[in-house]
Amino acid sequence: MATLSLGIATTVTTVTAVRTKLRPPSSRPRISCVQWDPEGILGPPQTGHIARLEFKRRLEKDAEAREAFEQHVREETERRRALRQSRDIPDTAAELIEYFLDTEAQEFEFEIARLRPRLDQEFFSHLKFEIGQLRFAVSKTEEMEDRLIELEALQKALMEGTEAYDKMQGDLVTAKRSLTKILTSKDVKATLLDMVEKNEINRSLLTLLDENIANAQRGDQKQAAAFMEKVRAAVLKYITV
């Protein structure tokens, strides 16, 4: 009756990411908590909550500002697409370390998702070994100290990033299963109540519903979109409760 999207939904998950490149030209790396933004289109927030609300209101009222912002988003999306296509995936753990050190902060989540199978125990063991060599070296140069700081920041970012990605993937698997159960149910209300008891209602399900509603609307499937909007309202109520 409705289109079940199996694509990865971008759930809002707090993860640790690098604000600048892990290898900046003249400054040490810095790690900050940001909202999960795989495409990194909006960039890191530069101001407080009130300023962001003011910026949103300005976009709503100022057509010229809105067009300029949308143009910036389109250009940034194209730049990122070109950058991703131009990069060669490394073959070894040592090369993969350099690859991530040269990755832009806003591309970090994307690269973690793309290279997740390569970020295995063998890779982290290699990274840990290099960090240990630098940390316990008898004599350290300034270059070695800088390298140690880079690698420790990279280790922290990759460990937290892979953990967040794995959790998101697990939540999405559950959400897809839950959505299939809802869309094929003869009694949606009873199904939702059963899912509440089993703790199967979560934000990932809500995000997946939003994605499917948007897909149905683009495909001019008005009946399917209307049905899923009703389901979304019910799911939202149970999440709120």
Image (spheres, rainbow, N blue to C red):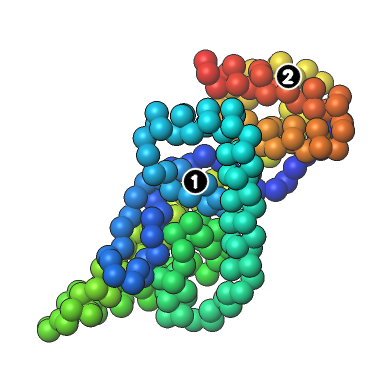
Relative height, residue 196 to residue 56 (above, below): above
Find the residue positioned furthest to the front.
Answer: 64
In this rendering, the answer to whether 17 lies above or below 141 is above
Q: Residue 218: image x %, image y %? A: 81, 37
The residue under the point 46% across, 80% down is 95
- Which is nearer the eye, 80 or 38? 80
Of marks 1 and 2, the one in the foreground: 1
Image position, residue 88 (x, y; %): 58, 78
Q: Which residue is mark 2?
A: 230
Separation (CA) of disc 1 from disc 2: 27 Å
Residue 44 seen in this snapshot: yes
Dot 1: element: loop
Q: Position of residue 79 (x, y in %)?
A: 60, 63
Is residue 177 shown to the viewer in this render?
Answer: no
Asked if residue 1 is positioned above or below residue 32 in the image, the reply reads above
Above or below, 206 against 118 in this view is above
Amino acid bearing label 1: Trp
Location of residue 206 in the rendering, given as x and y in whole percent from the top left corner: 62, 30
Q: Nearer the viewer, residue 138 or 225?
A: 225
Give yes or no for contact between labels 1 and 2 (Cβ–Cβ under 8 Å): no
User: Quick one: quadrant of the N terminus?
Assistant: top right
Count neighbours of disc 2 (C-alpha within 10 A) and say few if under 14, some if 14 to 19, many if 20 or more.
Answer: few
Q: How many marks?
A: 2
Q: Residue at x 60, y 45 (%)?
A: 68
- Identify the residue position indicated by label 1 in the image: 36
Three-letter code for the amino acid on which mark 2 is drawn:
Lys
Q: Quadrant of residue 26?
A: bottom left
